[in-house]
Image: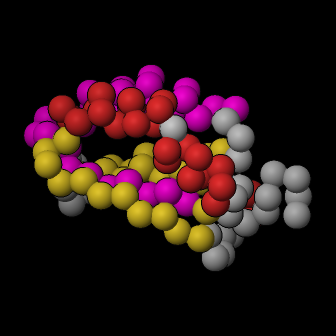
Amino acid sequence: MYARVVWGKIRKDRWEDYRKFYIDRVVPTTQGMKGFRSRLLLRGMEDPDEGIAISFWDNWEDLDAYDKSEVRQSSASAARYLYAGEYGMEHFNVDYSSEGFLTESANGE
């Protein structure tokens, strides 16, 4: 299992716009996509203009294909106006999870 983690600072008082964009535009693009498992959107408690989006994938090939896809690049470009300039993305191997679906593949392996 692999995770794609995106961190960013959202423009002041634009979190609800970002949340709506994420739910309406980003979430539907991955539903049913090969290897996609789940998504999380986290909002900072100390800084409510800071957020982290995490998506979980069965394997590296499917995550990499999503990263390089036109649909992902289009969504990222469309959201740029909401970011305050600070933005980053990293990939992780899910080494352990108390939630079984994060460490088992879609076919139960």
Residue 107 locus on image (x, y percent): 88, 53
Residue 104 locus on image (x, y percent): 79, 63
Residue furthest out toward the top? 24
Quarter location, residue 82: top left
For the point 19% across and 41% down, the residue is 83
Residue 72 vs residue 95: left or right? left
**Is residue 4 found inside the magenta-colored segment of the image?**
yes
For the point 81% across and 51% down, the residue is 106
Q: Nearer the viewer, residue 54 or 67?
A: 67
For the point 11% across and 40% down, the residue is 12
Residue furthest out toward the bottom? 95
Residue 85 locus on image (x, y percent): 14, 49
In magenta, the rendered stretch is: 3-32
Query: On the rendered image, what quadrant is the C terminus found in?
Result: bottom right
Query: On the rendered image, what quadrant is the N terminus found in?
Result: bottom right
Q: Is residue 99 visible?
A: no
Residue 17 vs residue 94: left or right? left
Q: Is residue 74 visible?
A: yes
Quarter location, residue 24: top left
**Is residue 42 found inside the magenta-colored segment of the image?**
no
Residue furthest out toward the right? 108
